[in-house]
Image: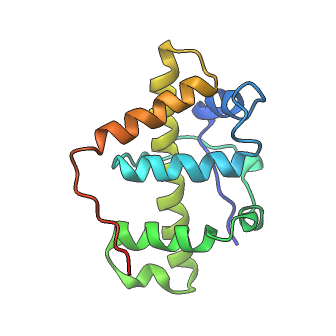
Amino acid sequence: MKRIQRANDKEDIIKLLITDQVGVFKEIWKLLLFAAQVGMRNGRREPLNSADTGKGIDQSTFGNCPAWPGVLYLMALAETESTICMSGSPEAEDVRIAVFQEYANGGLSMLQDFFAGRPLDLDGLLAFIETQREESAGQPDLELTI
């Protein structure tokens, strides 16, 4: 299994968001999962320009989240619009990992931009989440209930 990488230029925001000051993300994998979803929701996919391979996170760490494999596969499926990314081949795994890493990087960039002029604390994170909710207020709710 490939390791999940993160961009070196996002280390400062990562360190700030996993501190006790914010109190939400105790582990980096949780932050990356959140950031990837923020990035995908906003269509912000950014390649990792430089990553320290020694800081990569083993995918088994994400195993603490039962939704992890599904999130990874669904992100890749939505991005590629092809079932090829669902196969167990090394190439398909590369695609799934790249999609996740790039959306996480985009989400981290959004967080970095948002907190550039604001205090980074729980209230600030809640304000960020509220801006995400406000931006989707005009979009149709696609929640399907059976």
Q: Position of residue 11 (x, y in %)?
A: 66, 32
Q: Residue 89 vs residue 103: left or right?
A: right
Residue 130 lies in quadrant: top left
Q: Position of residue 2 (x, y in %)?
A: 67, 67
- 105, above or below 62, in the image: above
> What is the basis of the colouring in this image?
rainbow
Q: Residue 31 vs residue 96: left or right?
A: right
Q: Quadrant of the N terminus?
A: bottom right
139 or 100: which is nearer to us? 139
Residue 22 lies in quadrant: top right
89 or 35: which is nearer to us? 35
At 43% from the left and 47% from the top, the residue drawn is: 39
Q: Quadrant of the C terminus?
A: bottom left
- 32, above or below 59, in the image: above
Residue 82 lies in quadrant: bottom left
Q: Position of residue 6 (x, y in %)?
A: 62, 46
Q: Position of residue 17 (x, y in %)?
A: 66, 32
How many marks the image carries: the answer is 0
At 64% from the left and 23% from the top, the residue drawn is: 121
At 69% from the left and 61% from the top, the residue drawn is: 3
82 or 53: which is nearer to us? 82
Q: Residue 102 vs residue 18: left or right?
A: left
Q: Kindly give the residue lying farthest to the front in the view shown.
A: 146
